[in-house]
Amino acid sequence: MNNEFEQDELEKDEIEDSEKSQGKMVKGSAWMTIGSILSRILGAIYIIPWRLIFGASLFPLANTLYTMGYNIYSEFLTIAIAGIPSAVAKEVAHYNALNEYGVSAKLYKKGITLSIVTGVVCALLIYFCAPILAGSGGKNAIPVIRSLAWAILIIPAMSLTRGYFQGFQQMAPSAMSQFVEQLGRVIYMLASAFFIMVIIHGSWVTAVTQSTFAAFVGAVFGFLALGWYYWRRRDHFQGLIASSDNAINVKTNDLYKEIISQAVPFIILGSGITIFQLIDQYSFFNIMHWATNYTNTNLQYIYAIFAANANKLIMIVVSLASALAITVVPLLSEARTKGDNHPISKQLSNALILFEFVMFPAALGMAAIAGPINRTFYGTANMDLGADVLTFSAIVSISLGLFTVVTALMQGISENKRAVKYFVVGTVIKLVTQVPLVYFFGAFGALMATAVGFTIANYLIIHSLRREFGLEMDDIKTNSVKILTFALITYLVALIVVYGANFGLGLIFNYNSSLISLFVSILATAAGGFVYLFLVLRSRVADRVLGNKMKSVRGLLHIR
């Protein structure tokens, strides 16, 4: 009788722990999602005034130059950061679970030193190697690339500090810092571009260079926001350190080994999307010169449409997945430290379902409003091709977002090497398919090769997770079917609203104008969003994904 009672209590505790972990993941995801979305939206909205400042003739060239510089910068930044923030978040969560907050603090201090070193080394490399890295950007790309070296100096240390907070499962400071960083960057880049192009009628290359230097300005503000948050909570952190068990004494060299052993896979996996973008950047022009008789200027226009314009918008959607990925790593690490396989299986399943819940409607919604949203940001130049590319990119973004999540899951359970192996397979597939697909399908071919590469990598990773931890496949399949069905209905509703609004407003206004296109985009998004919200609340899918708090939301909206 006592055994049965103890078993019931154990099962009850497991359920409570599972619900607690799910609650932490949802709350953390909410913070990171808000911060990430606001940052991405700011990072996309700036393009409207930035385009107007440069004008129709110079904007495509400026946008291409900016994107080329940023793709190279992103890769160097990933190497400089070295995956240390996520590695530190994971290790901090590990030691916190053992009540060794003192070790966590020591880990952070050693990580800061390492971040400063990697930042300086990578900043010097990108600065002095700029002429080699410029590629098809030519001499114009050199000052742009060099201007980004300043940001690489300090962003690794800032990212590490975010990782430290995340290890405590405190996502608010990271979200706040991201937003402040992006706000500072956008204000400086618009102000500098306006001053150079409009007031003193300077060089457009100089204006682009200052726009990329804005990354450094934003980073300074982001770092200050983190410092302000820590200063307000310093007593709390110091209290945790004072109450540590202090039963573990980790040597400095061991701490560095732990950080570096975790960091190398993070570099590779964290660079995943950037590596695919660099493959496009360094191969697209050569393949297209071989396949067509387009001039280099024409190819820069086409490249900007899929690599810059569409990419900026779909990364808003992919940032949703990134928010989930960042949140789940510490939780998985904590469960792994405690040796609990059942919670790991549950958390993995919850993470995949939560990803689908957010990503499917977001990606399909973006596809539905591709026409008006593309005109809102990029005007009417090449608007048909731009809309088609954005539609296709939005669908491809699902595979990008899934890769971000599943690689984070693998890292959270310390399966880094296996994740890297599967990514290498996906990269080889991208390289093999790149030439024939770009040759026959141009910009769409580059996106196809990306989709194929990431899809294969994702399949291998999910298959590995299922084999090792026994994912709750019945639950995943049931909810996946419902979520996909609701997302498709959302897509159709939004698409109908787009066509209907274009027709109705077109009787009075020019529906191709940026302002009307923005209105149509908001209207279609609101309609589709309301339908999706109604469906997931009515079907109780929202309860499964977000918890029992959805009952109050359902009551508030009078949904049975």
Image (cartoon, rainbow, N blue to C red):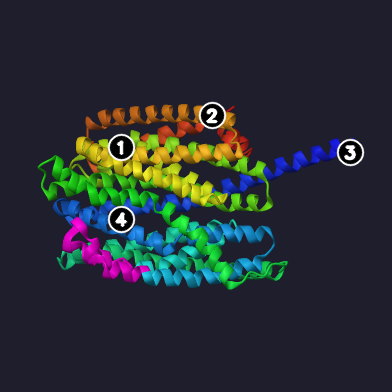
The quarter in which the C terminus is drawn is top right
Under mark 1, the amino acid is Met
Looking at the picture, does residue 62 appear above or below residue 146? above
Q: Which sits earlier in the primary sequence, circle 1 or circle 2?
A: 1
In the displayed structure image, the side of residue 363 where residue 290 appears, left or right = left
Q: Which residues are magenta?
A: 122-150
Q: Amino acid at mark 3?
A: Asn
Residue position for label 4? 71
Q: Position of residue 352 (x, y in %)?
A: 52, 39
Mark seen at residue 477: 2
Residue 170, compared with residue 289, is above or below; it is: below
Report how far apart the C-alphas of labels 4 and 1 lie in the structure.
Answer: 19 Å
The CA distance from mark 2 to mark 3 is 38 Å
Q: Which mark is residue 448?
A: 1
Is residue 121 found left or right of 417 in the rendered image? left
Q: How many marks?
A: 4
Circle 2: residue type: Lys
Query: Disc 4 and disc 2: Cα gap in Å?
Result: 36 Å
Is tag 2's residue or tag 3's residue first in the polypeptide sequence?
3
Q: Which residue is at a point 51% across and 65% down the rendered structure image?
A: 161
Does the segment drawn in magenta span residue 448?
A: no
Residue 310: x, y in percent? 29, 44
Residue displayed at 16% across by 50% down: 56
Q: Could you say which is closer to the camera, residue 87 or residue 550?
A: 87
Q: Nearer the viewer, residue 318 or 523?
A: 318
Q: Which residue is mark 3?
A: 2
